[in-house]
Image: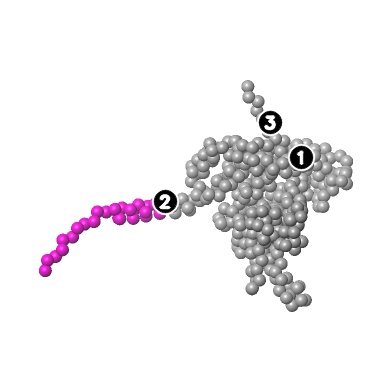
Amino acid sequence: MAIEKPTSQLLRILESASPAQRVLKARRPDRYLADSVRFPFLALVGQPEMKLALILALVNPNVGGVLLIGPRGTGKTTAVRGLIDLLPQVQRGTCVNGLGCEPDAAFALGIDAVCTDCATRLGRGESITAPDRMRLVELPLNARLDDVVGGVDERVALEQNRVRVVPGLLSSADQNLLHIDEVNLLESAIADAILDAAAQGQYTVRRGPLSATYRARLVLIGSMNPEEGRLRPQIQDRFGLRVLVRGLPDPEARLEIYHRVRDFRLNPHAVIAAWWDETRIVAEEVAAARETLREVTIPHAIEQIGLKWIRDLCIDSHRAEVTLFEGARARAAVDDRKEVMREDLAAVAPMALRQRRSPFIVEYFADQREEEAEIARVIHLPVRKTRSRRK
């Protein structure tokens, strides 16, 4: 008799929809104090799909980010901010010249791909990166394009009579989470700049004769209320996973939400302390899953299942395959497995394939097929021979 492998503790926590009871007793010890007080991610009641999507994006940035869609007051922003305590460490460049030199560039492109100081350090066998924790960067609603991509340092221009290009918020978001609240209300120019940078992993700022290129390898998380306006299809397609966040229908679950919010307002440190053990466990498993991800593979038979689903749903965007398969790899890594199973695809499919079908495109191509059939009928008509007239 086969012994079924137990699901990882991380998945059990994320997929549990029933609220756990917590008794808030003593004050939280000082050693657990955070820089700011945030409602614990794991203390959110229900919403297993939203929790899973955000964790998968942390584990595998190639998922392509997450879009949370739902009415006000359903915990979207609270969940994103709660991720801070789960963020893993990444390797950041320590270039003293601020050029972002990385060892991979030197190994792949040669020593000229890094600055002289970093090349010297590499030659001495020193590391030019250091571990640093990921951060959450939030885009202010009143941000200007120059704030986002960067621009001319006005203070230096006025005081020193010279022009210097300074990086913007996108550069700060490199290897971090970038959260855009009310993404459907974002100005088109800013949205396009963010999407292009997220897709390419870098962006270039040009101001007159000056230009500078910055890295922007970020995990994009957007949230929106559909009552306040629709999201342009171009922007929506750039988000890998889409989650519909609704209020919980169960009265007991809703009552539990009220109790936890009340407790948090009365004693936030006690609430954080009550969930600290679970938070620490999940943070460790997220870091471990990022390491496991490198070895996770997808069997050919599982790939064919995913391709069939996409074909049957008449989805044209190739981002559907990327998101579905990368999300499934991340879920397998979260479950401490090195091979994707059908259940991984099934868990990710609703989030990866939701809202990717376009009725307009289906109708458009249907009209084109009719026109092409008419063209084919005309060009394949037999050519009639005409008799030449004799003078």
Q: Is residue 347 left or right of residue 383?
A: right
SS under mark 2: helix
Marks 1 and 3 close (CB-CB < 8 Å): no
Q: Does the stretch in magenta take in 198? A: no
Viewer-side label of 2, 3: 3
Viewer-side label of 1, 2: 1
Q: Which mark is residue 6?
A: 3
| Nearer-N-terminus badge (1/3) | 3
Q: Residue 281 carries which label?
A: 1
The quarter of the image holding the N terminus is top right
| Nearer-N-terminus badge (2/3) | 3
Q: Which residue is drawn at 14% across and 65% down?
A: 389
Could you tell me residue 355's position as x and y percent?
55, 48
Could you tell me residue 198's position as x and y percent?
63, 56
Name the residue carrying label 2: 366
Gap between marks 2 and 3 measured at Cα: 48 Å
- Per the rendered image, the range of residues in magenta is 366-391
* Residue 231 at least partly seen: no
